[in-house]
Amino acid sequence: MENERWKRQLAIPQFGMEAQQKLRESRVVVLGLGGVGGVAALYLAAAGVGCMVLVDRDVVELSNLNRQILFSTADIGKPKAEIGAERLLALDPGLKLEAVVKDIRETDLKALLQGSHFVLDGFDKNAHRLAVNRACVRMGLPAVHGFAQDFSSELIAVLPGQSACLACVMDENFPEVKETPVLGVSVGVIGVAMAAAAIRCITGLGEVMAGCRLIYDLAFPELIKIPLERDPLCPVCGR
């Protein structure tokens, strides 16, 4: 029955049962279940990731629904992490899920991330993103950070010790707005790209594309890739 669920991807010669088993034995943490995090979580659950931790302190609001396709109008006022867990379990009843409805502090991250194979950061504040980056680099956990604003979105994947980290390219003074204007399709594209990075890292199929900015903009016909240099004086990963 389980093999029937993933029949189409198991039929890919380069994928097969070995990659599927790696996904099923993996634990992925999704921090922030908004536009990018919710889309990434959906595709990871569909692909067969075995255990997921969904972290979000917020409830669903009407203004979320132009981009946060994990939720519906009937979910307004309900906790995102709990509703997200219900949706993913409906997709795959064999998925092990933990819903965390709380404001995560940096001191919480070590216990939360312990034993994980990949971390997806969809938080929307610089301070939270940078705290996740510090924890992941310290713990040696591969991670991908997703952002979106206006017509564009981007991700930065980090392999600790091998690539530039988030702190190499931004700090807490990096510009941010109180309420981010965004078109839903932009976060959808980058959410799928984040899920793809996790699958590549967990299965070993292809490169994670760490150490670069991968940018999608509705005005351009292709994704833009900008290499990032590792900062030797970076306070997080500097040599």
Image (cartoon, grey):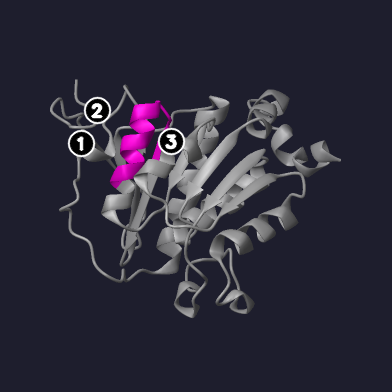
Q: Mark 3 points at which residue?
A: 110
Q: Compare marks 1 and 2 and give the one earlier in the sequence.
A: 1
| Camera sees residue 197 | no
Disc 2 packing (10 Å; few <14; some 14–19; many ≥20): many
Which residue is at a point 24% across and 28% down the rendered structure image? Answer: 237
Is 128 rendered above or below residue 113?
below
Tell me the amino acid under the disc marked 3. Answer: Lys
Q: Quadrant of the C terminus?
A: top left
Q: Compare marks 3 and 2 and give the one earlier in the sequence.
A: 3
Disc 3 packing (10 Å; few <14; some 14–19; many ≥20): some
Residue in front for this viewpoint, 4 or 79: 79
Q: Position of residue 5 (x, y in %)?
A: 78, 44
Which residue is at a point 55% across and 39% down the rendered structure image? Answer: 28
Bounds of the magenta span?
Answer: 130-144
Tell me the amino acid under the disc marked 2. Answer: Cys
Foreground mark, 1 or 2? 2
Q: Are marks 1 and 2 in contact (CB under 8 Å)?
A: yes
**Disc 1 from disc 2: Cα separation:** 8 Å
Q: Name the residue under label 2.
A: 237
**In which quadrant of the rendered view does residue 106 lie?**
top left
**Disc 3 from disc 1: Cα separation:** 21 Å
Tell me the amino acid under the disc marked 1. Answer: Cys
